[in-house]
Amino acid sequence: MPGAQNTGVEGGVGLTALMVAAARAIETHRPDALAGDAYAEHFVRAAGASAAWPVRPAEVPDGDANPLWGRLGRYFGLRTRVLDDFLVRSAHAGARQVVLLGAGLDARAFRLDWPPGRVIYEIDRDGVLAFKHHVLDGLAAVPTATRRPIAVDLRDDWIRSLVSTGFDPTVPTAWLAEGLLLYLPPAAERRLIDTVDRLSADGSTLAFEVKLGPESPEVRASPVYVAARQQIGVDLLALFDGEPRPDSVGDLRGRGWSTAIHTPFDFTRHHGRGPRPEPNDALASNRWVFANKPGTHV
């Protein structure tokens, strides 16, 4: 699909959506895949910036030894599996709505087996969603739940757009901020957490990813960051917001949510595959947070 309207994903944070899509595509074709996403490689091939990137393990130079498509790619595969499980578990536990904050090129509304009656809201910038629609329409993709995309920047007032599209704050919701908060200014993160709390009925759940503080010069020079710059021109360190991060976990606890914090390596051990710790590790400060508003346990 060389004619795809791909201006929303050709640079900046939008380019990271293609990077994650490529990692999901590679993971999908592994014999021991943790997650499957049949749409991911089509996103990668449709954008000029990523058309030559690998989408299968055999296309990765050096295989799993490649810091980008090997180690970081496996990280994204593991993250996809863990968050897939979280959302489906939340839906079966009573969440009637799912809100994907910064949905990017994820295809969960199409590839997961949702219980009947669930509604999936996908919030992202207009350019990202336009590119996504172009590719999915070309594949005649059919969602497995009611899907409601909302084109809005999460740094702006997105509440009105969400509610006007049918979101009901009186029923339990599963919220997901996958690979999002790392790029938001602290004030935007605080507003997001406050908004999620105010719009969440009892029984709602939330999962998000954070990094613990600034990384050392040794970590910033790690092979993962270097490989992303050299192989695909993505400078992750430049995209991460450098200001001190708010304590969103403490904020949620103060509002009555229960929270659990995990390292990615916790799930590597659980699933028996995925990235493992190494010296000066770019993944060591990553944390995956799961929160529940009283009323359910997932």
Image (tube, rainbow, N blue to C red):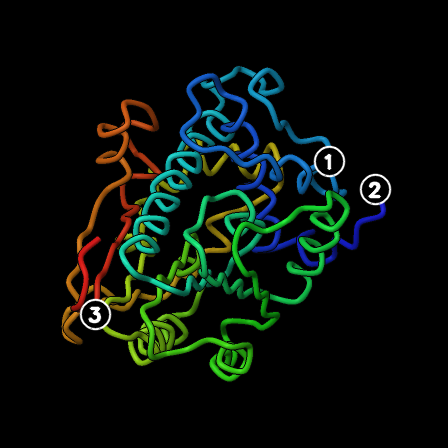
Q: Earlier in the sequence, mark 1 or mark 2?
A: 2
Q: Secondary structure at mark 2?
A: loop
Q: Earlier in the sequence, mark 1 or mark 3?
A: 1
Q: For this rendering, which residue is in front, 248 or 282?
A: 248
The residue nearer to you, when weighing 123 against 294, is 294
What is the x, y in percent for residue 16?
56, 48
Residue wearing tag 2: 2
* Residue at 50% across, 53% down: 238
Q: Residue at x 38, y 64 (%)?
A: 96
The answer to whether the residue labelled 1 contacts the one labelled 3, judged by CB atoms less than 8 Å apart, is no
Asked if residue 159 shows in the view, the reply is yes
Q: Secondary structure at mark 1?
A: loop
Residue of label 3? 252
Q: What whole-number distance in Å separates the C-alpha atoms at marks 1 and 3?
A: 41 Å
Q: Position of residue 264 (x, y in %)?
A: 28, 39
Q: CA distance from mark 1 to mark 2?
A: 9 Å
Q: What amino acid type is highlighted by mark number 2?
A: Pro
SS class, disc 3: helix
Seen at 25% across and 55% down, the residue is 290
> Amino acid type of disc 3?
Leu
Percent from the top left, x then y, of residue 119? 48, 63
Q: Residue furthest front?
A: 116
Q: Is residue 278 visible?
A: no
- Tell me if label 1 and label 2 are in contact, CB under 8 Å: yes
- The residue carrying pointer 2 sits among few (fewer than 14), some (14 to 19) or many (20 or more) residues within 10 Å by Cα, namely few
Q: Nearer the viewer, mark 1 or mark 3?
A: 3
279 sits left or right of 101 in the view? left
Q: Residue 89: x, y in percent?
A: 30, 49
Residue identifier under label 1 = 51
* Foreground disc of the pair 1, 2: 2
The residue at the far right in this view is 3
- The amino acid marked with disc number 1 is Ala
